[in-house]
Amino acid sequence: MLKAMKCKNVKITGGVFRERMDLDRAYLAELDTGALLQNFHIEAGIPVKGQQTVYEPENSGLHWGWEAPTCQLRGHFLGHWMSACARLFDTDGDLELRAKLECVVSELARCQKRNGGEWVGSIPEKFFDIMAGEEYIWSPQYTMHKTLMGLVDAYKYAGVRQAIDIADRLADWYIRWAEKMQTVAPSAVYKGEQGGMMEIWAELYYETGKDKYLTLIDLYRDNGLYTQLNNGGDALSDDHANASIPLSHGAARMYELTGDEYWSRTTDLFWKNAVTDRGMFATTGANAGEFWIPKKKQAQYLSDNDQEFCTVYNMVRTADYLLRRTGETKYADYIERALYNGFLAQQNMHTGMPTYFLPLRSGGKKKWGSKTRDFWCCHGTMVQAQTLYPQLIYYTNADENRISVMQYIPSEGQIKLGEARVLISQTTEMKNYNNQVFFDEQSGEEKSRWSLKFDVTCVRPANFKLAFRVPAWAKGVTMTIDGEQADAEVVNGCIEIEREWEKSTIYLMFTSSIEFESLPDAPELAAVVDGPIVLAGLIDRDCGLEGEAPEEIFLPRSEHTYGTYVWRQNRYVTRKQPVNIEFIPLYEVTDEVYTVYFTRK
């Protein structure tokens, strides 16, 4: 199995991913602590300062939208905020965010005490009893899962001990409620988008070693989806996508803790249902209006409500579980595609705000959230997503004495492998692209975002394998080690170099090309993809594309300015078309009207 690096051992150093993390960090710091806690204070009977009576909601300083005190999902955002702050402290040592996080945790402890010592919810306990009947209630377990998740992450990544103590006492409330439901309404424990609960109980068992979490795991493990997956057939079509994906996390984490093959088989079957058999848009999404699209029917569901962002984030987490267990690079390829066309594409590159869905119909336009007035589920997921990058880049395998680089994101990793202490830094090498004169500044060719430089430094000379994923989209790869051309043989999706390392510089360059990716139920409709990056045509309709070879249709559009970076390339203009238009990366589209799928003529 592969082991991911801890956040504290990886730092994102530059490029578009660092830019997006910085936007996220600024937003997390900007939010008012009192407003973040407003619903927890209200539920605990703690007066919200200055808000006894609200005459002008827009000027009150409170959070509204899904965080408004009238919303049944109120309070869900705080858990995401806590998780994001904790992870940024872990990777960047951000003391300001940690201090703010400690303050929030302390206030949650105060709320828990006021509520009798266990309950620490932003919603009433009675919401859970309502689930025992037929009356509709909007996802109380979803809301409380986010609080538990935030508390656990505050402990794991920021070392806030008080956070896990709060979660541990809250678990006692859950045990009593869940056991009561066994005699009143056993199905209640599976209501309210409870998909994430298995994973959180497994995580708390791992962190505390307390047997009471085994009790909770047993109460939550018999979810109907697990049974459907293991019985074969299509277990997902037309079901709520984001309610089901977290169940794959619970199964995957249970396998890590128990080694029970039932759980690994269940995760594999989920992936087969969700991805392999279903197909997906070029962006990785396979849902519309929050529901799984029936197998191979993506063209029927092109709309403004495709690819809910929560599903992108959660599918990346599923893929990471599978990558670590199997080592198969197809999962890293999926993650890469999702990072560019979900994590980046659904975050506003100027404000950091999310879009709930990603429009994929012709003439779509992204709808951005506001800073304090929306707080959709995807709002919370987005602030968390931008802190995930450090965990997706470097992996170790002690049994095979190997370090693997799975994502190409400018970063530094401090890695321990057996007795070896290794520092790996990677940057996007901003020199010219020329296969004959490798990285020759005078070649006059186009710059390439896939020209990569790695510096490998060991405290003492050490022998180990260093593996680099070769992306599925790569048409070729060239490598030099310490200035000399090296063999780039690809085995199981990776170039693997075994030698004694001390101080070396490696250059890698992957050759990419524009490809058309068609939809299975409408093969005449195709997206334009450059490497892993989906391109968007800046036009309000499907104007069609004439011609066979992409290189005959797309002319690179480059600039020579100090502000032009390789990760801001991948821009093109069409030629020899009835209507010639500009194509840019989907993740750079902000307020433009755009089209992703075009009719091939």
Image (cartoon, rainbow, N blue to C red):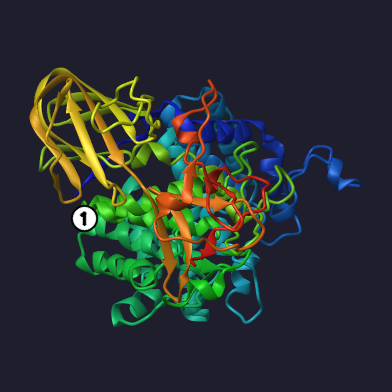
Residue 181 percent location from the top left of the image: 50, 75
Mark 1, residues whose alpha carbon is within 10 Å: few (<14), some, or many (≥20)?
few
Q: Is residue 500 above or below residue 3?
A: above
Observer-nearest of 312 and 151: 312
98 sits left or right of 500 in the view = right
Q: Is residue 475 above or below residue 221?
A: above
Dividing the picture into quadrants, the one containing residue 509 is: top left
Residue at the image position 46 percent from the left and 34 percent from the top: 567
Observer-nearest of 432 and 490: 432
SS at circle 1: helix
202 sits left or right of 465 in the view = right
Q: Is residue 232 above or below residue 516?
A: below
Residue at the image position 67 percent from the left and 43 percent from the top: 37
Observer-nearest of 497 and 418: 497
Residue 416 percent location from the top left of the image: 21, 29
309 sits left or right of 175 in the view = right
Q: Is residue 559 above or below residue 302?
A: above
Residue 118 percent location from the top left of the image: 54, 52
Number of residue marks: 1
Dividing the picture into quadrants, the one containing residue 256 is: bottom left
Observer-nearest of 469 and 308: 469
Residue type marked 1: Thr
Residue at the image position 40 percent from the left and 78 percent from the top: 235
519 sits left or right of 232 in the view = right
- Is residue 177 visible to the viewer in this orientation of the structure? no
Q: On the image, numbered disc 1 is attached to which residue?
A: 326
- Is residue 95 visible to the viewer in this orientation of the structure? yes
Residue at the image position 90 percent from the left and 45 percent from the top: 56
